[in-house]
Amino acid sequence: MTKDLIKNYLRPGMQRDSIIILLGQPYMEKIEYRLPKELQVPDSVSKIDSIGIEKFNAWHSKFSQPDTIMRYPVGWSTIDPNFLIIKLGQDSTVTDFWVEQG
């Protein structure tokens, strides 16, 4: 069902109100600091230990940007829920959407 929704119904540029008419109120809607999709974590900060986590946090703070995210639960993986994530732009239109484990 989620694949059909993504393939046939969701489109970049849709208004937030259209998403709510289609799917109902989201489980959660908030601003999250996320890395741009095209940005990869460099090897120099990818090692997570007591020193590495500080480097990673500093790097993440520098490059992350605020995104308005709508979350809809769509099922479970082994032990964690999966969510349909809908990212909204400044004008409350859809800029991207995907499924991620939460």
Image (cartoon, rainbow, N blue to C red):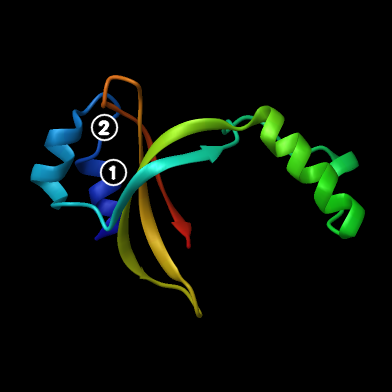
Residue 70 visible in the shown view: no
Could you tell me which secondary element the residue under label 1 belongs to?
Answer: helix
Where residue 34 appears, x then y in whole percent?
A: 55, 38
Q: Is residue 16 above or below residue 24?
A: above
Residue under the image location 21 percent in, 28 percent down: 14
Nearer the observer, 82 or 71: 71
| Residue sitting at the far top | 91
Residue under the image location 58 percent in, 30 percent down: 36
The amino acid type, in three-letter code, at marker 1 is Lys
Nearer the observer, 58 or 86: 58
Rendered-image quadrant of the N terminus: bottom left
The amino acid type, in three-letter code, at marker 2 is Arg
Residue under the image location 38 percent in, 59 percent down: 83
Q: Residues within 10 Å of mark 2 (few under 14, many from 20)?
A: some
Q: Are marks 1 and 2 in contact (CB under 8 Å)?
A: no
Q: Which residue is mark 1?
A: 7
Could you tell me which secondary element the residue under label 2 belongs to?
Answer: loop
Residue 52 visible in the shown view: yes
Q: Which residue is mark 2?
A: 11
